[in-house]
Each structure stands twice: as structure tokens, then as C-alpha cells.
Image: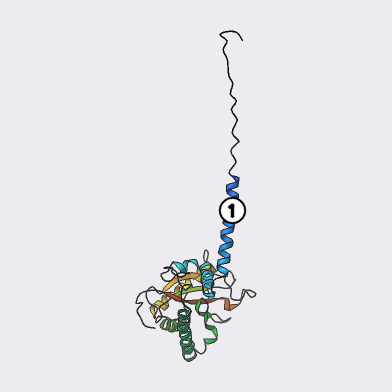
Amino acid sequence: MERGAVIIIKKRRRGHAAHHGGAWKVAFADFMTAMMAFFLVMWIVGQSKAVKQSIAAHFRDPGAFEQAGRGVLPGSERGVDGGGMSSGSIQEARAILEKAAENLRETLRQDFAELQNRIEVRVTDEGLLIELREAPDDGFFASGSATAKPETVLVLAAIAGELGQLRNAVAIEGHTDSRPYTAAKGYGNWELSADRANAARRIMEEHGLRLGQVEAVRGYADTRLRLLEVPFDSTNRRISIVVRPNGSAGQDLDTEV
């Protein structure tokens, strides 16, 4: 090596491995979501019948759980009925509705004997159900109209007088058959079913329902037929009054039942 020569030292740097993509994060998130859903299903399977019914009711009608009251699970502050209720409370609530149903049946037998075969009163898991069904040659409203007949006003007034004594919230629903409504342009079965339900609400509030006791008025047109196999049957045209099993509504909540 010559004196004065410049010595150059080369240091090789090892390259870093390329960064992994983010696909694994998406896959991992999907896996965790599936596991959470699995454990949620397993948890529901192990719950009591009352909790299962409350969860099912929530998915059928989520809006109802925005009302004040108990929630689906024990300790909840919102919702309508009862996963956190004791079996005694559930039985007591059902007994109140059974008593109201018995009183209504007796009133119908005494005062509306000619209509009682067109009015059903029964207690279901979702509450007290009262249905006013049309006959092939007679209805509770004028044909194609939301104008209630005089006898309909009397029937709804009698029902309101009984339900107004309860603390329970009430929903009123209108239903039609599948015949297209063509009497007016821009007006169909949706409008007719909603208008009839709202007309029933007005009558009942004038004759006994407390202020705020009605929690919902709904028009379903022909989307919830009573007889699916006979869509034009007259009994598909009906007004349904649903009394919630444990949902308090309106004012005067200290009223004794």
C-alpha cells in the first residue's frame, strides 16, 4: 500500500423487512365480532323465559323501550316490561289485564250482544289485545272512510272507560285487507288504516283514556293480515287496541286500579 493512500471502509446496512399490510386487522376484528355474537347468543339461551320474552319484544318494537319504566334486564332504568321484574310482579300485572278483559267481555255481552262475535278480547304475552273486526256486509267505519259509525263510538267509549282506570300504556293500530283503495288519488290503504286508528284514538280519549295514555297510533295497511291465506277476507279490516302489560303511561299515575 502506498504511503498516503486513502483507505475507504464500506459498511453494509441490512435492510428492514417490509411492513405487513393491515388485512390481518380486519380479519381479527371479524373474528372478535363473531366471538362476541356467539357468547351473546349463549348468554341469551341461558336466561329465564321472562328475559327472553323482553328481548324478543324489544326487537319487535324497539320504540316501546323509549318509554319510561323498567328495562329489559335487571337494574335497567328504561323500557317497558320486565326482564328485571319478579315472577310475582309479572303475575300481578297479568292478573290486572285478565280482570280488565273479563270486565270488557261482560260489558260486550250486556250492551253489545249483536257485536260481540266481531270483537275479540284476550290477554297475550304482549298484553291485552282488543280487536274490532269488520263483517263482510258491515263495518265499524263508513265504507272506505275513517268516519266511525254511531255504534262504534259507543263500543270504543265503553272500552276507554275500562282502560282509563289502568296505569298501562295503550297502542292503537289500524289494518286493512289487500284490496287496493282507489277512491281518491294519493290516498290508499296506508292512509286509511292510519286515519281509522287515529279516529279511534280521538274517540277513546274523549271517553275515558287518560291524557298521555296512548303511546302509539299506527297504520299497517295490509302488511299484518289476520288471515294470510285469505288476504281479501273482511276480518283483515280491523282496529287493534294493545294494552301494554307493565308500561305505565300518562298522568295521574297514583290512580288505584
Report the quarter where the C terminus lies: bottom left
Is disc 1 placed on a helix, strand or loop?
helix
Residue 233, percent from left and from top: 61, 77
- Image-based side of 106 in relation to 254, left or right: right
Seen from this angle, which residue lies furthest right? 229
Quarter of the image that includes the N terminus: top right
Q: Position of residue 123 (x, y in %)?
A: 51, 81
- What's under tag 1, amino acid-wise? Asp
What x and y, as percent, mark residue 185? 53, 64
Q: Specify the quadrant of the image occupied by residue 226.
A: bottom right
- Please tell me in which quadrant of the rendered image residue 89 appears: bottom left
Q: Which of 48 and 116 is in front in this view?
A: 48
Relative to residue 54, is residue 18 drawn left or right? right
Chosen colour scheme: rainbow
Identified at 55% across, 86% down, the residue is 117
Decide which of 75, 227 is in the foreground and name it: 75
* Place of residue 19 in the rendered image (x, y in percent of width and height, measured from the top left): 58, 38
Pick whichever, 227 or 6, lies toward us: 6
Density class for disc 1 (Cα within 10 Å; few <14, some 14-19, many ≥20) is few
Vertical position of residue 87 compared to residue 63: above or below: below
Could you tell me which residue is drawn at 45 percent across and 76 percent down?
246
**Left or right, 31 with reference to 156:** right
Among all residues in the image, which is located at the extreme top? Answer: 3
| Residue beneath disc 1 | 30
Kindly give the residue lying farthest to the bottom in the view shown.
110
- Confirm whether residue 142 shows in the render: no
Q: In this figure, what is the number of numbered marks?
A: 1
Q: Is residue 216 visible?
A: yes
